[in-house]
Image (cartoon, rainbow, N blue to C red):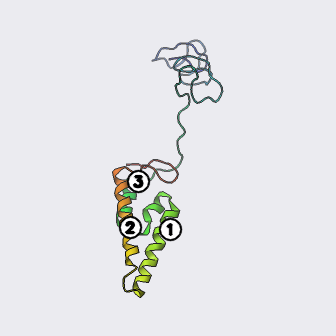
Amino acid sequence: MYCKNCGNKMDDLAVICVKCGAAKGTGANFCPNCGGETQPGAQVCTHCGVPLAPPPTASGEQKSKMAAGLLGIFLGGFGIHNFYLGFESKALVQLLVSIFGILLSVFTCGVTALATTGMAIWGLVEGILILTGSVRADAKGVPLKD
């Protein structure tokens, strides 16, 4: 391991650099893996290819995978799980098709109930996909918590 501030070789258990006094992991002038000089704001060391900055994380509150999955299974026909996860456009389509399907089925003797049934199946499948881990993040890219 090398000091990110001065490039001096450091012991892996050290908490500060003995040459410059910088705390372990502070600084952005040198690669902690090879000690090579790095450019300001570089994401990867040009000498050894090691990532220099942690990958950007999506900010925001994590949504529950269990809640989203159960909403999808039980209320998925109305798009409630997609509203919860932030997929408003898809949720609005599911909600409107379901509502109009229910309203029109009264006048068409149940013929348009197929649309409502289709939305329910769509929601059920998405709920199962969420619970099995196929859907891993919400609309903002924030990972779902278990």
Say if mark 2 contacts mark 3, CB within 8 Å. Answer: no
Q: What residue sits right under mark 2 in the picture?
A: 75
Q: Quadrant of residue 122?
A: bottom left
Q: Residues within 10 Å of mark 2 (few under 14, many from 20)?
A: some
Mark number, residue 64: 3
Q: Secondary structure at mark 3?
A: loop
Type of the residue with mark 1:
Leu
Residue 59 position in % (x across, y down): 54, 46
Q: Quadrant of residue 114?
A: bottom left
Q: Secondary structure at mark 1?
A: helix
Q: What residue sits right under mark 1 in the picture?
A: 92
Residue at point 40%, 58% (across, down): 68
The reply, left or right, for residue 13 in relation to residue 29 is left
Q: Which of marks 2 and 1 precedes in the sequence? A: 2
Q: CA distance from mark 1 to mark 2?
A: 13 Å
Say if mark 1 contacts mark 2, CB within 8 Å. Answer: no
Residue at point 39%, 65% (across, down): 76
Foreground of the two, 50 or 143: 50
Type of the residue with mark 3:
Ser
